[in-house]
Amino acid sequence: MNTLLLVEDEPKTGGMLKQALESEDIEVIWAKNGKSALDQMENGKFDIVILDLKLPEMSGVEVLEGIRSVDKYVEVMIYSNYQEPPVMKKLINIGIEGYITKGADADLWNTVEMVKARLN
């Protein structure tokens, strides 16, 4: 079974995505803030990380830097509707494998299919 770290502070968004991924036999560990995400990275091995950029206390960029210091090779997909060019450039330079748009227009099952494609 694949294991995914979901870093998302919004309860409704995180809960829906977690449930959808688990229905596809993907184990989901849900971290609701950056510190929790980095603690989870220290304690486990993940096949993929889904990372929101807008988080309390730490930015997504800071969390990504922390993830990369623990595991240089884990796939990280940004999950956000925030696309400022300087931030995106920095994320790409640190190392991300993809970008998933979230929000009212996002298709939950499309997101699940994107994640499954990365895991196979």
Image (tube, rainbow, N blue to C red):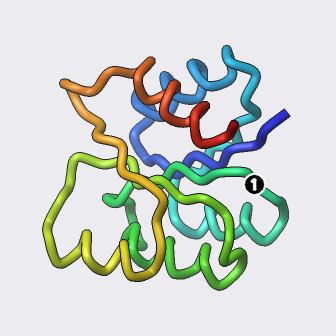
**How many labels were placed on the picture?**
1
Q: Is residue 6 left or right of residue 111?
A: right
Question: Residue 77 placed where, x, y %?
Answer: 47, 53
Residue in front for this viewpoint, 14 or 112 = 112
Q: Secondary structure at mark 1?
A: loop
Q: Measuring 65% from the left and 70% from the top, which residue is drawn there?
A: 38
Residue in front for this viewpoint, 6 or 113 = 113
Q: Measuring 27% from the left and 27% from the top, which residue is drawn there?
A: 106
Q: Is residue 4 above or below residue 90?
A: above
Residue 24 occupies which quadrant of the picture? Answer: top right
Q: Measuring 30% from the left and 37% from the top, which residue is drawn there?
A: 102
Question: Residue 8 placed where, x, y %?
Answer: 47, 47
Residue in front for this viewpoint, 62 or 94 = 94
Quadrant location of the N terminus?
top right
Residue 22 occupies which quadrant of the picture? Answer: top right
Q: Is residue 27 left or right of residue 102?
A: right
Q: Measuring 35% from the left and 60% from the top, which residue is drawn there?
A: 53
- Crowd tier of the residue under label 1, counting other residues whose Cα lies within 10 Å: few below 14, some 14–19, many 20 or above: some
Question: Residue 31 placed where, x, y %?
Answer: 60, 51
Quadrant location of the C terminus?
top right
Q: Is residue 76 left or right of residue 45?
A: left
Question: Residue 112 placed where, x, y %?
Answer: 51, 26
Which residue position is annotated with label 1?
46
Amino acid at circle 1: Phe
Residue 117 occupies which quadrant of the picture? Answer: top right
